[in-house]
Image (cartoon, rainbow, N blue to C red):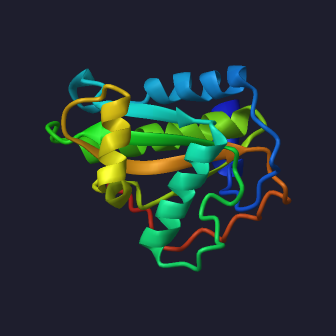
Amino acid sequence: MNDVIKAITERRSIRKFKPDAVPEELIDEVIKAGTYAANGRGMQSAIIIAVTEKNLRDRLSAENCRIGGWKDDFDPFYGAPTVLIVLADKSRPTFLYDGSLVMGELMLAAHSLGLGSCWIHRAKEEFETDEGKKLLSDLGITGEYEGIGHCVIGYADEELPQPAPRKENRVYYIK
């Protein structure tokens, strides 16, 4: 089995992370991989915001928790020290697909570098809030962007989960 297919079949969502910071070089490698994701008409409409600053990471987690309706002490980022937020330009007809492909590339790249990852939802709702819009504005990001997801990354503090059995009747051939 080649390395790419091996990474695809072995990657799992991690839901318990060590607090150890991820070296910036590894974060940069993961992000670079995300920027090479396939995208509609080569427009590269998706953007990535890397959050390693703990206070902002914790504020994003608290807002995500509020949107999700959990108890205040729940961390929907599972303790991951790094959050890679993917947003995509809503003016592009393929924005949702483009951003989703970036998320997939980020998770595969993280796995290939020995990091755990998990796709955390509610970025759409998060960046519709005044605080989310202000964060984009403070970063100088203009335009209409929709939050696609948070790719949380870090060092796993759990065994790699076993894959669920593959469901039947998901592939059809026409010969």
Task: Please tell me which residue is depicted at 66% across the width and 70% down the height of the picture.
Answer: 164
Instruction: Say if residue 102 shows up in the picture.
Output: yes
Q: Is residue 54 above or below residue 64?
A: above
Between 162 and 73, which is closer to the camera in this rendering?
73
- Left/right placement of residue 28 relative to residue 47 reads right
Q: Is residue 132 above or below residue 115?
A: below
Between 5 and 65, which is closer to the camera in this rendering?
65
- Residue 150, x across and y down, in percent: 50, 49
**Which of the image's four quarters has the N terminus?**
top right
- Left/right placement of residue 156 relative to residue 49 reads right
- Residue 147, x across and y down, in percent: 35, 48
Task: Please tell me which residue is depicted at 63% across the width and 22% down the height of the picture.
Answer: 29
Task: Please tell me which residue is depicted at 84% across the width and 55% down the height of the picture.
Answer: 157
Q: Is residue 115 above or below residue 12?
A: above
- Residue 158, x across and y down, in percent: 84, 59
- Residue 152, x across and y down, in percent: 61, 48
Task: Please tell me which residue is depicted at 17% across the width and 36% down the height of the picture.
Answer: 92
Instruction: Say if residue 175 shows up in the picture.
Output: no
Quadrant housing residue 109: top right
Between 56 and 175, which is closer to the camera in this rendering?
56
Between 130 and 148, which is closer to the camera in this rendering?
130
Number of marks drawn: 0
